[in-house]
Image (spheres, helix red, strand yellow):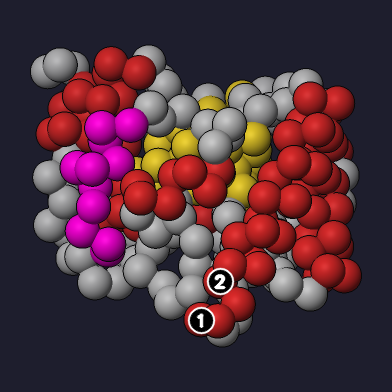
Amino acid sequence: MFGVSTNCLINKPLNSALSILADLTSVVEVMDDGPHFLDSSEILKSFSFKYFLHAPSRGVNISSHLEPIRKASVEVIRHCVSIGSEVDAQGIIVHPGYFGWADERDICAFQLQKSLIEIIEFSKEYSTKVFIENMPKWDFFFLKTPEELSLISGFPLALDVGHANTNNCLNEFLKHDISHFHLHDNEGFLDSHLAIGDGNIDFAPVFKKIAESGRCPIIETDTLDSAIRSVNLLKKEMKKI
C-alpha cells in the first residue's frame, strides 16, 4: 500500500486535488497548510480515503523561544490533531521547529521539549498518532541528522527521505525505527521534491526498509506528473522485494 501527498496539487483547491487523487490512490496525506489548510473535517469526510495529515508548518514554530508563539503553534497542531481524529487519520506529521539565532539553540531545544509534552498529551486525548519529521539542510532547524533523535525521544519518526539526502545521512537514519515515510528525490543539495529516480538517491535500501516495516509510504513530490511516475516506479520496485 502507498499514499500520495496533496502537495503535488497544492495550487488547486483541496476538493479538486482529492478528486484527482482518487484515481491514483486510496491513501492521501493532506498538506494542511496554505491552500489546503483545514478549517474542519467536512471536505475530508466527503471522500473515502484513509488519511494522514501534515500539520501546518510554514507559519508555526513549536520550538520558538517566544512563549506566546510556541503556545499558539502548539494550539495549531492541536487543531490539526482534532480534525484528524474526526476522520480516523492514520497519523499527524509535525515539524520540530527551529531556533532563530545560534545562541538560542539550547533554550529552543527546551521549548521543543515543552511542546512535545503537550502534544503527546492531546494526541492521547484524541487517540491519534503524531510523528515528528526530520528536516532538510536548512539553517537553525532541529532534527536534521540522527544525532538529534534524542530531542524527540518517545515520538515516532517520520523519515523524509529527500530531507535526509540533503544532509547526507539517509543510510544512518535507515538504521533506526521508522514509523512513517515521505518519498521524493533530489540531487543532494536542494529540497526539490522530484519524482523517484529523477535525483541521486539510492532507493533500494529505502524500499527494503519499507517492506520490513510494513508501513504505508507517502509520495510527496511537487507535481502530479512526478507523483504518478513515482507511484509506477514504487509499485514496480516493491514487487521485487
Provide the residue span drawn in magenta. Answer: 166-176
Please state which amino acid type lies under the numbered disc 1: Ala
Q: Is residue 45 above or below residue 211?
A: below
Q: Are marks 2 and 1 in contact (CB under 8 Å)?
A: yes
Q: Position of residue 19 (x, y in %)?
A: 61, 41
Residue 167 magenta: yes
Residue 156 magenta: no
Q: Position of residue 121 (x, y in %)?
A: 81, 33
Q: Quadrant of residue 206?
A: top left
Q: Which residue is mark 1?
A: 102
Q: Which residue is mark 2?
A: 105
What residue is at 16 percent from the left and 32 percent from the top? 205
Q: Position of residue 154 (x, y in %)?
A: 58, 31
Q: Is residue 133 above or below residue 34?
A: above
Q: Quadrant of residue 120?
A: top right
SS category of the residue bearing label 1: helix
Please state which amino acid type lies under the numbered disc 2: Arg
Q: Position of residue 150 (x, y in %)?
A: 48, 43
